[in-house]
Amino acid sequence: MRGKLAALAVSTAMLPAFAAGAAELNLICAADVVVCEKLVSAFEAEHSDISVNMVRLSSGETYAKIRAEARNPQTDLWWGGTGDPHLQAAADGLTAVYESPRMSELHDWALKQAEVSGNRTVGVYSGALGWGYNTKIFEEKGLKEPACWSDLLDPALKGEIQIADPNSSGTAYTALATLVQLMGEDEAFEYLKALHANISQYTKSGSAPVKAAARGEAGLGIVFMHDAVAQSVEGFPIKTIAPCEGTGFEVGSMSIIENAQNPDEAKIFYDWVLSAEVQNLMPEAGSFQLPSNKAAVASEHVPDMSQIKLIDYDFAEFGSAERRQALLARWDKEIGGRAAD
């Protein structure tokens, strides 16, 4: 028995230091997985004393997970994804108040996100909504380039379009809220019913539609324009379009979870990722959004927001729990039900 106890003592003593309580960070990343992995590897290289446990989920999935775990949070920090669900989480008290010492370095649109949420979230990047289409497929099938939202209703595009489900995807919810603000709610749902005839699939992920178009599995994907640009930069025949009637945009956001298990580590990551140096790494991972730090240098491939007709997107209204839940419920009833037929 003494021999076994001695052996156990020796083996315990030989355990690596991190097993005895090294710092951890439980991160949900709601951006493209390549971007997420780039952030984690860069952070761990600079902060070798903190081990990051990262899970990639879409914005809607993240909100649902955080809400379900409200009494016993398993997540410390939520980085990326559209701002609307971040604002809803803030309104629900699911995220914590935090003002980074880097706030003075950020663009006004990033600070507005913090102001609206009572400093429970902050903007980390921005990008406009549009679509990317496969020029090779359109040429082979003799399809006309769609320059406007109205053009997507062309019967010739039947089965050629993909868009995500707004319940799981922040991108698709932004599209839904954009159309409501452009047209009015009833008119927007009539438009979506007509568009449904041309939809081949409602995907889970917001960027999946244009990736399918890049692979030739669809003709066109309704996405954030930077996701379409990422495919063309990789060499796929994808052309990016900003709709002529006007379009919405996202403020990709970041939030610390209320009652997080590792709040100090979350704040370290939060401050770190707001720096210009870190945001300058994003194009290396194929991320072509507009960075929130004023000193960060945007990639030459980032769509020029000044050349896009942007609506005055109401983040406060469409990020509110009541408005978002009502729109999603109506989408499920009038559009999602059709998708299941």
Image (cartoon, grey):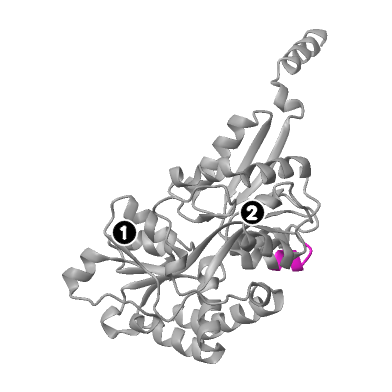
Q: Which of the pair 286/215 is nearer the observer?
A: 286
Give the image location of residue 299, x and y in percent: 43, 50
125 inside magenta stretch: no
- Can see residue 96? yes
For the N terminus, give its image quadrant: top right
Q: Which residues are magenta?
A: 88-93
Which residue type does callout 2 highlight? Leu
Of 90 and 164, nearer the camera is 90
Secondary structure under the numbered disc 1 in the rendered image: helix
CA separation in Å, label 2 and label 1: 34 Å
Decide: few, some or many residues near mark 2? Use Cα within 10 Å; few <14, some 14-19, many ≥20: many
Q: Quadrant of residue 148?
A: bottom left
Q: Residue at x 58, y 44 (%)?
A: 276
Residue 219 image offset from top left, x and y in percent: 29, 69
Which residue is pictured at 58% across the width and 75% down the height? Answer: 313
Q: Which residue is mark 1?
A: 214
Q: Residue at x 65, y 34 (%)?
A: 51
Q: Can residue 169 be seen in the rendering of this structure?
A: no
Q: Quadrant of residue 314?
A: bottom right
Three-letter amino acid code at disc 1?
Ala
Mark 2 vs 1, N-terminal side: 2
Where is residue 268? Give x, y as percent. 71, 40
Residue 106 shows which numbered tag? 2
Magenta span main SS: helix
Q: Of tags 2 and 1, which is closer to the observer? A: 2
| Callout 1 crowding tier (Cα within 10 Å): few <14, some 14–19, many ≥20 | many
280 vs 45: above or below? below
Q: Is residue 230 left or right of residue 127?
A: left
Label placed on residue 299: none
Q: Decide if residue 330 is on the left or right side of residue 35.
A: right
